[in-house]
Image: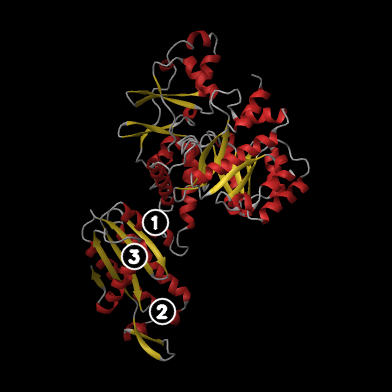
Amino acid sequence: MDKYKELRKILDERDIRTFFQPIIDVKNAKIVGYEALSRGPIGSILERPDVLFETAKQCGLLWETEYLCRTLAIERAKRNKISQYLFLNVDPQIIKDSKFRDGFTTEFLKLYNLSPDNIIFEITEKTAVEDYKAFREVLEHYIKQGYKIAIDDTGAGYSGFRLITETKPQFIKLDMGLIRDIDKDSFKQALCKNLLSLSKITNMKLIAEGVETINELSFLIEIGVEFVQGYYLAKPSENISDLSQEIKDKLIFLQNEKSKKLTYNAKTCPIGKIVRFDTPIEETTKCKNVKEYFDKSSVQGVVIVKEDYPIGLVMKSELNFALSRPFGNEIYLNRPIQIIMNKSPLIVDYSLPISEVAELAMSRREEHLYDYVIVVKDNKYYGIVTVKKLLEYAMELELNYARHLNPLTGLPGNLIIEEKLNNIIENKIKCSLLYIDLDNFKPFNDLYGFENGDRVIKMLADILIEISKEYNSCFIGHIGGDDFVIIIDEGTMNTEGLCRQVIREFDRRIRSFYTIKDLTNGYVISVNREGKEVEFPLVSVSIACIDGDLKGYKSAKEIGEHLSYIKNNAKNQGELLYY
């Protein structure tokens, strides 16, 4: 049977299969829409969609074929009770056709309990747009009715960018060719980041389609892409279902890891957080197979393992150099890779801080300076980190961390403090929380000026830093103004001793900020809130403390409110109050 007869048979019998592939919001791990995908009958010469639509075009039956696919997609969306967005693929020439406008009406959608607000026309590039002005006017007709527009295959060629420029759609769908191995390709990464910036500036939503690996997904989430689609998350299906719990858990995990970057810097972030998993090979693998692997992929190195532990590394450049030598192909191609591999690569544990790994990587011999860093966890191969990724991430962490430091004291500010507390709650970490506040600071500030007020705040920060050095694993944060927080690990003894050291040292140093007269009097005279001159005591420190288990708290905000309550009691009852 020739293609024309097969197509006519399909149209007459309405023999088109409709699959729905979910589009997912990574922030809350929920499905926000489905793309309707059409396929020919199983076993048909027109089963593949590209062959189906190309044949329809050649036979002058594109309108009839698209109309059938679209109608069946809407009927089956109703059957599946789809209430989210429904993405329908539409050829640019078809959407301009008067028959499309006459047939695709609000009344037509009502028959299937759908609203224009739920429909997104996904403009494909089967046919080139010749008159962009006229095409834009057509799109405006639908947008005014509530329909939305998505441009498909962005990043695949110039025409996709032209479509975006001329049509200003609500959604941009990144081509799967751009997403493939994006975690390994710096050019693709740069292009994706620029498109993401464009989408934010223009209020367009970016959808990354064709996501097939955890590494691709991780990179996309890390740079801020909100919507994803692909086989890794969910394959197209004729019947819709919720995301698997495994995928939901991975999305939540990756989002949490992204948010934790606030509390990390290069000295505290473990190298395992930026690992990319590349499939390792066995030591008996032949060199010719490794060469074929390099030729077909964008990776620059491969790890050799024995019983799940890395025993060597071969970089693409090393293999090419060996093969380029006289009789290199004859000598090496049919021999195992172990004769070429570097038997002493840099192998580090998952928990080693990025800063330490960077030092180790940069101290290698020059010929191995840009070799992969191999990461192990629980004494098994876990993945690799490129030197480029290592250095870029270390710089990004430091810059990102610095943005959230208090400009006066250089200590972590509110966002980092909040993330630190939420992490403590989430992981049920036992610790001591100290809330440090200055008493009678405002009268001092009013009388001696803001410059001296800042000097006092800086002095308190210095005291906290100096004294905390004597204790293990202390986190110090500057909430703002004269309020500070210290988080001390459970293993640190004598929390009360730390508090009393802070109070004593502050009382000693604060004296240098007062005149002899005020020190002799033991108070200052300043104006209160009612505008009257009254006596105020010298500046002192109050410390509130929550000690032990925080499982009763649900959020950092709840902890802050309780600490504030304790602090106010401390001000009224004395310098130090424990709970």
The reply to whether residue 538 is visible in this rendering is yes
Mark linked to residue 558: 3
Q: Name the residue beneath numbered marker 2.
A: 442
Q: Image check: 73 left or right of 565? A: right
Sequence-wise, the earlier of marks 3 and 1 is: 1
Q: CA distance from mark 3 to mark 2?
A: 27 Å
Sequence-wise, the earlier of marks 2 and 1 is: 1
Q: Residue 254 appears in which quarter of the rendering?
A: top left
Q: Secondary structure at mark 2?
A: helix
Q: Image check: 487 left or right of 329? A: left
Tell me if mark 1 has few (under 14), some (14-19) or many (20+) residues whose alpha carbon lies within 10 angstroms of its own: some
Q: Secondary structure at mark 3?
A: helix
Residue type (three-letter) at the residue carrying disc 2: Lys
Q: Residue furthest front?
A: 12
Residue type (three-letter) at the residue carrying disc 3: Glu
Tell me if mark 3 has few (under 14), some (14-19) or many (20+) residues whose alpha carbon lies within 10 angstroms of its own: few
The reply to whether residue 413 is visible in this rendering is no
The image position of residue 101, as x and y in percent, is 70, 48
Residue type (three-letter) at the residue carrying disc 1: Glu
Q: Secondary structure at mark 1?
A: helix
